């Protein structure tokens, strides 16, 4: 089962530039010689494989929270999608480590503790609402 996740992650890493181009601008993808529909299909299949494997491993609540909350938390900090993905991965790791430590220390359920830490990180990073305003 985990081999599918590795294959899906490897495919996304290998096709990163094409996937990003097709996702951001369909006309640019055509101009670059890419088929945006094919790239979107590859992205959808990889995401489906990775989510299906992860749901079996850790559960629906954690998957939904770890997909959405870290990406939303760093939206105001990152200038490029690659940087955003890297920072979000770091936030996921920190939330998981601190959430599991908190669950152990306070004798609380692990998954809600991880989600609470991720939400706290989101709140701290976005406490200043002015970063969300369009400055351009």
Image: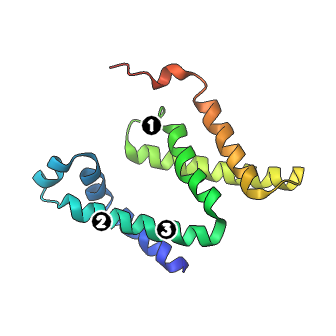
Q: Which residue is mark 3?
A: 50
Q: Earlier in the sequence, mark 1 or mark 3?
A: 3
Residue that carries the numbered disc 2 in the rendered image: 41
Question: Quick one: label 1 or label 2, which is nearer the N terminus?
Answer: 2
Residue 15 point in image, percent of width and height: 31, 63
Question: Which of pointers 1 and 3 indicates the residue nearer the eye?
Answer: 3
Q: Secondary structure at mark 3?
A: helix
Say whether residue 43 is left or right of residue 56: left
Residue 83 on image: x %, y %: 43, 44
Q: Nearer the viewer, residue 46 or 88?
A: 46
Q: Few, some or many C-alpha atoms within 10 Å of disc 3 (few <14, some 14-19, many ≥20)? A: some
Say whether residue 50 is left or right of residue 15: right
Q: Is residue 84 above or below residue 52?
A: above
- Whole-angstrom CA distance, mark 1 to mark 3, is 24 Å
Q: Are marks 1 and 2 in contact (CB under 8 Å)?
A: no
- Residue picked out by circle 1: 78
Q: What is the spatial separation of the Cα atoms under label 3 and label 2, in whole angstroms?
A: 14 Å
Residue count near mark 2 (Cα–Cα under 10 Å), binned few <14, some 14–19, many ≥20: few
């Amino acid at each position: 089962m985990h081999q599918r996740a590795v294959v899906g992650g490897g495919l996304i890493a290998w096709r990163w530039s094409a996937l990003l181009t097709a996702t951001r601008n369909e006309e640019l993808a055509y101009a670059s010689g890419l088929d945006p529909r094919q790239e979107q299909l590859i992205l959808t299949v990889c995401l489906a494989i990775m989510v299906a494997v992860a749901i079996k491993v850790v559960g629906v609540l954690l998957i939904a929270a770890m997909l959405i909350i870290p990406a939303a938390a760093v939206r105001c900090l990152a200038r490029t999608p690659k940087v955003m993905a890297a920072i979000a991965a770091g936030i996921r790791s920190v939330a998981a480590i601190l959430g599991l430590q908190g669950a152990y220390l306070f004798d609380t359920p692990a998954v809600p503790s991880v989600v609470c830490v991720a939400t706290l990180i989101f709140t701290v990073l976005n406490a200043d609402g002015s970063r969300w305003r369009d400055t351009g």
